[in-house]
Image (cartoon, rainbow, N blue to C red):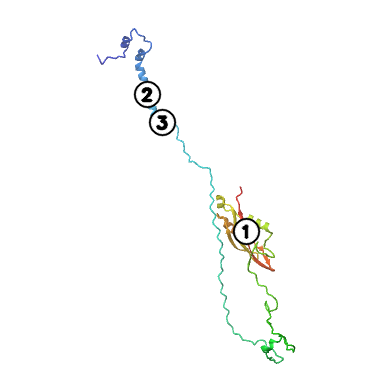
């Protein structure tokens, strides 16, 4: 009896809800409970199956997108620091040995013969006492005695011919402090010198990267032949500017040499070279 008892049978429902409103409420829920339970079961099962099968189906229907590596369009210029300019070493040519000359037999000839027409007359040298009261002359002559001579040594200079020989001037004159007859000049004047510097001077890349600017002071000597020598650095700013200034000065063509006392002389110049970054 108890196993066959079902509270949701229509007979029990009619008995319980006899003389009651059966259009809605608990009567309808109990009457349609089996249908509602089946619908809920199918709905829950469908949701459960879709939660697992959905991602698998989605991956099969839509292929995975290819991941492209990120490529940057930015280009960075890397400027390597310029190496300092090393002065070129002059190659010294090896001394060539002069070929030995073979010795040959020689015969000595007598030197030029001098013919003496008159016999040599020896004259006696006067005593010192006679010279104290007389003047030295070309011949002996009588006359009143004179006072003792304070000194009769004749002063001569030069090469023995009576003229004065000028010594070669190898000293270095300082431009701006020494007075010269003619100062050295670059071929074409200082405007041409400025154009030569602007045309050949290069701003080092390392100095531009670091924003270094200023003036480099260089000293050099204009030789007698107009060439430039003794190029040295007085004060620099670094970053390759000092080496560049020395390189340009060494590259200078010949100047017109300075003149003092009618001969070419050496003149030293102290000159600044400016490195400026244009804004």
Q: Position of residue 81 (x, y in %)?
A: 53, 53
Residue 53 in view of the camera: yes
Res 271 label: 1
| Mark nearer the viewer, 1 or 3 | 1
The residue at which mark 2 appears reads as 44
Left or right of 224, for residue 210: left
Q: Position of residue 54 (x, y in %)?
A: 41, 29
Q: Position of residue 253 (x, y in %)?
A: 64, 61
The residue at which mark 3 appears reads as 55
Q: Is residue 140 above or below residue 232?
A: below
Marks 2/3 in contact by CB < 8 Å: the verdict is: no
Identify the residue at horizontal 65%, vertical 56% (top origin).
Answer: 194
SS state under label 2? helix
- Tell me if mark 1 has few (under 14), some (14-19) or many (20+) residues whose alpha carbon lies within 10 angstroms of its own: few
Q: Nearer the viewer, residue 129 or 194?
A: 129
What is the quadrant of residue 140 in the picture?
bottom right
Q: Nearer the viewer, residue 123 or 40?
A: 123
Marks 1/3 in contact by CB < 8 Å: the verdict is: no
Q: Nearer the viewer, residue 178 or 268?
A: 178
SS state under label 3? helix
Q: Quadrant of the N terminus?
A: top left
């Amino acid at each position: 009896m108890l196993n066959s008892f079902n509270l949701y049978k229509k007979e029990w429902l009619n008995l319980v809800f006899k003389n009651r409103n059966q259009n809605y409420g608990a009567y309808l829920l109990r009457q349609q409970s089996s249908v509602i339970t089946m619908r809920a079961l199918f709905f829950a099962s469908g949701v459960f199956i879709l939660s697992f099968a959905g991602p698998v189906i989605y991956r099969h229907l839509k292929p995975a997108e290819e991941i492209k590596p990120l490529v940057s369009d930015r280009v960075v210029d890397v400027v390597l620091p310029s190496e300092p300019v090393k002065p070129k070493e002059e190659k010294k040519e090896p001394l060539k040995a002069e070929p030995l000359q073979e010795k040959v037999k020689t015969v000595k000839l007598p030197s030029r013969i001098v013919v003496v027409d008159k016999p040599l007359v020896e004259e006696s040298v006067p005593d010192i006492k006679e010279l104290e009261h007389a003047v030295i002359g070309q011949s002996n002559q009588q006359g009143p005695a004179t006072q003792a001579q304070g000194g009769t040594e004749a002063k001569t200079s030069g090469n023995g011919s009576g003229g004065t020989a000028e010594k070669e001037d190898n000293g270095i004159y300082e431009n701006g402090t020494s007075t010269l007859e003619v100062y050295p000049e670059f071929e074409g004047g200082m405007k041409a010198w400025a154009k030569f510097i602007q045309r050949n001077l290069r701003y080092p890349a390392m100095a531009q990267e670091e924003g270094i600017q200023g003036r480099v002071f260089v000293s050099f000597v204009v030789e007698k032949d107009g060439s430039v020598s003794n190029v040295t650095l007085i004060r620099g700013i670094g970053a390759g500017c000092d080496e560049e200034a020395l390189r340009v000065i060494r590259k200078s063509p010949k100047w017109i040499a300075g003149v003092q006392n009618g001969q070419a002389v050496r003149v030293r110049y102290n000159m600044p070279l400016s490195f400026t970054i244009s804004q």
